[in-house]
Image (cartoon, rainbow, N blue to C red):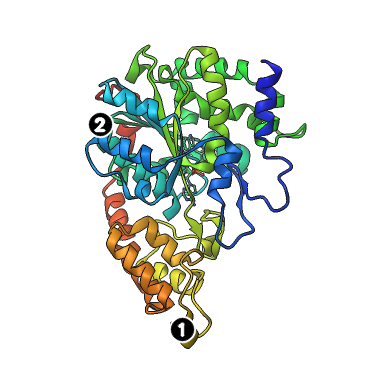
């Protein structure tokens, strides 16, 4: 490795952030601002590219339809090398999608739906194969979860993912703890990547130190490996295909490392599409996360629980009294109910009207919360109904290494 390369990677370090800087890495998302993470700043810090209107115009031209509302609204806001994937699609050449989930709880939450809903749209739009990595190994290192429990949670999470509606003929879901033993080509690629990355680099990127267990140090190569198509010989044979990875931007450190390594071992750098975080109910200073029950709407929550959580915990950008609210209006930039609606209410015109009405004071916080409850409850109920239909046998089919439709 050249000194330049190493300096470049160390400059992306998650260590030593300035005090007032947002912290965004695979384990922490924290901002001091009540408006939440400054995503423009993050683009600069991470060195990714903003998705601008020119790129969106090109996207629509290439797919000959309107882009997903996550793209229209800047929820999917940043990318790396998206143009190369659009070129590939335009010239009728194949590529594939790769995303994942770290099974740290048996229930996923509303925030996790974001990259997976977007992935479903990408799969339907481009009609391409998708591989989904369940990093049950990762959760044994970071969350001190027993291996058997992590495997069980991976299986349960696979049900949630399948319920989102992925096409079984185009989707392979795998658990690291199982698939690494089934597929020598996958493990061989892990080794190819591990040969290229020094301890110094992962220290810089992930903040590891001398007392970090070696499993954690070696793990980033395992999350990088699905970006090499030859890790799935039953799907791609020996073909080296370009890969597009949709994820929230907390996962970018893994893929900065991946993009540094892939050209050195004869593969194209994976392209990325980054989404923002669905914030915690209590406010946009942090993301929704499974570790805090009250900040989170789980996909298993009952309609009553969803209603209570929103009414009790969703941070309001409204004023202290009705009179004051009518006079001054609410602040959509910090209001959690409004922010959730921008993720889950598909109707652009209605969202715009709600913004106007809340900002002018015509719409009260309680009314806005009711609109949110009426919007997300059917999404969660439909998800629960779809999940109830996912049998263990169907999960096993999705998780069996097999040919997919290319
Ligand atoms: P995990 O399980 O933390 O998260 C799964 C996916 O959900 C995204 N995410 C969120 N998106 C919006 N709002 C939130 N509040 C929110 N919280 C999490 C994550 O960015 C991720 O896309 N190490 C990974 C698993 C993994 C993976 C991958 C993820 C393995 N390979 C490839 C993305 C792409 C993890 O623990 O994700």
Q: Tell me whether the residue at label 2 lies in contact with that at label 1, contact meaning CB atoms closer than 8 angstroms.
A: no
Residue 385 numbered mark, or none: none
Who comes first in sequence, dot 2 or dot 1?
A: 2
* Rendered position, 72 above or below 337: above
Category of crowding for the residue at label 2, using alpha-carbon neighbours closer than 10 angstroms: few (below 14), some (14–19), many (at least 20):
some
Q: Which residue position holds label 2? A: 127
Of residue 230 and residue 124, the one placed in the foreground of this image is 124
Q: Position of residue 388 (x, y in %)?
A: 29, 52
Question: Image check: 125 left or right of 110?
Answer: left
Q: Position of residue 301 (x, y in %)?
A: 40, 62
Element on which disc 1 rests: helix
* Rendered position, 10 above or below 352: above
Q: CA distance from mark 2 to mark 1?
A: 50 Å
Category of crowding for the residue at label 1, using alpha-carbon neighbours closer than 10 angstroms: few (below 14), some (14–19), many (at least 20):
few
Q: Quadrant of the N terminus?
A: top right
The residue lying at 39 percent from left, 25 percent from top is 84
The residue lying at 54 percent from left, 63 percent from top is 283
Label 2 near ligand 1 (CB < 8 Å): no
Q: Residue furthest front?
A: 54
Residue 327 numbered mark, or none: 1
Q: Position of residue 11 (x, y in %)?
A: 68, 32
Q: Residue furthest bottom?
A: 323
Q: Residue furthest right?
A: 210
Q: Is residue 166 visible?
A: yes
Q: Is residue 393 visible?
A: no
Question: Image check: 212 left or right of 93?
Answer: right
Question: Image check: 303 left or right of 199?
Answer: left
The residue lying at 29 percent from left, 65 percent from top is 350
Element on which disc 2 rests: loop
């Amino acid at each position: 490795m050249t000194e330049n390369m190493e300096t470049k990677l160390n400059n992306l370090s998650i260590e030593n952030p300035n005090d007032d800087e947002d912290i965004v890495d695979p384990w922490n998302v924290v901002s001091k601002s009540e408006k939440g993470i400054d995503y423009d700043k993050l683009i600069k810090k991470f060195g990714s590219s903003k998705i601008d209107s020119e790129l969106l115009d090109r996207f629509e031209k290439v797919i000959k339809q309107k882009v997903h509302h996550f793209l229209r609204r800047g929820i999917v806001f940043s990318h790396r090398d998206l143009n190369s994937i659009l070129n590939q699609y335009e010239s009728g050449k194949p590529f594939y999608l790769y995303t994942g989930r770290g099974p740290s709880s048996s229930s996923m939450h509303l925030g996790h739906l974001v990259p997976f809903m977007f992935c479903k749209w990408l799969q339907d739009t481009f009609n391409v194969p998708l591989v989904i990595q369940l990093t049950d190994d990762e959760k044994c290192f970071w969350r001190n979860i027993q291996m058997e429990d992590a495997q069980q949670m991976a299986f349960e999470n696979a049900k949630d993912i399948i319920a989102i509606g992925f096409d079984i003929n185009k989707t392979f879901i795998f658990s690291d703890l199982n698939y690494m033993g089934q597929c020598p080509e996958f493990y061989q690629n892990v080794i190819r990547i591990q040969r290229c990355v020094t301890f110094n680099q992962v220290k810089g990127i992930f903040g590891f130190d001398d007392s970090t267990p070696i499993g954690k140090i070696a793990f980033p190569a395992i999350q990088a490996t699905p970006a090499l198509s030859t890790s799935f010989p039953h799907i791609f044979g020996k073909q080296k295909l370009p890969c597009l990875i949709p994820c929230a931007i907390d996962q970018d450190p893994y893929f900065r490392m991946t993009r540094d390594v892939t050209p050195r071992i004869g593969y194209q750098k994976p392209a990325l599409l980054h989404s923002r975080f669905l914030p915690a109910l209590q406010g946009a200073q942090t993301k929704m996360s499974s570790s805090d029950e009250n900040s989170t709407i789980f996909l298993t929550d009952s309609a009553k629980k969803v209603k209570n959580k929103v009414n009790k915990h969703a941070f309001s950008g409204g004023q202290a009294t009705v009179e004051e609210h009518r006079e001054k209006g609410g602040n959509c930039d910090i209001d959690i109910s409004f922010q959730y609606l921008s993720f889950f209410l598909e109707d652009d015109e209605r969202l715009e009207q709600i913004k106007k009405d809340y900002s002018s004071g015509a719409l009260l916080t309680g009314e806005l919360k009711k609109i949110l409850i009426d919007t997300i409850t059917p999404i969660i109920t439909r998800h629960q109904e779809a999940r109830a239909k996912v049998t263990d046998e169907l999960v096993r089919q999705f998780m069996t290494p097999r040919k997919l439709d290319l």
